Image (cartoon, rainbow, N blue to C red):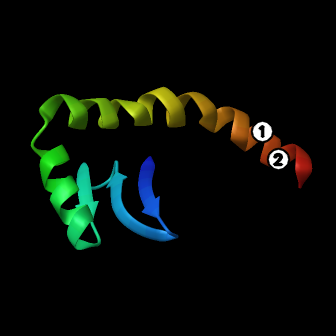
């Protein structure tokens, strides 16, 4: 799962989760930003592609590292 969170003063105001497939806002400012970002189809598709770019390419490396350290 790919998660990208935005914080200000240690308070999370938005989060993108690949399992949900859209941005979710946690504050008034975050809800407004999430609504704006969710209406941008190119941004949503780019965020969904990040799962394949980052997670799927690194899972085997992380898994092997865990096995050698345990």
| Extreme-right residue of the structure | 69
| Residue 33 in the image, given as x and y percentages of width and height | 21, 54
Q: 9 or 55, which lies in front?
A: 9
Visible residue check, residue 62: yes
Q: Which residue is pictured at 43% across the width and 55% down the height?
A: 5
Residue at the spot of label 1: 64
Q: Is residue 47 left or right of residue 4?
A: left
Q: Is residue 14 above or below residue 26?
A: above
Q: Which residue is pictured at 13% across the width and 36% down the height?
A: 40
Q: Is residue 33 above or below residue 64?
A: below
**Which of the 4 quarters of the picture holds residue 25?**
bottom left
Mark 1 falls on what kind of element? helix
Residue at the spot of label 2: 67
| Extreme-front residue of the structure | 9
Badge 2: residue crowd in 10 Å (few <14, some 14–19, many ≥20): few
Quarter placement of the C terminus: bottom right
Q: Which residue is pictured at 71% across the width and 43% down the height?
A: 63
Q: Are marks 2 and 1 in contact (CB under 8 Å)?
A: yes
Q: 36 or 67, which lies in front?
A: 36
């Amino acid at each position: 799962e790919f998660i990208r969170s935005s914080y200000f003063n240690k308070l999370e105001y938005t989060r993108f989760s690949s399992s949900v497939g859209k941005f979710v806002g946690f504050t008034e400012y975050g809800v407004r930003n999430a609504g704006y970002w969710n209406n941008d189809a190119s941004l949503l598709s780019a965020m969904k592609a990040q799962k394949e770019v980052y997670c799927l390419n690194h899972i085997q490396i992380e898994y092997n590292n865990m096995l050698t350290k345990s």
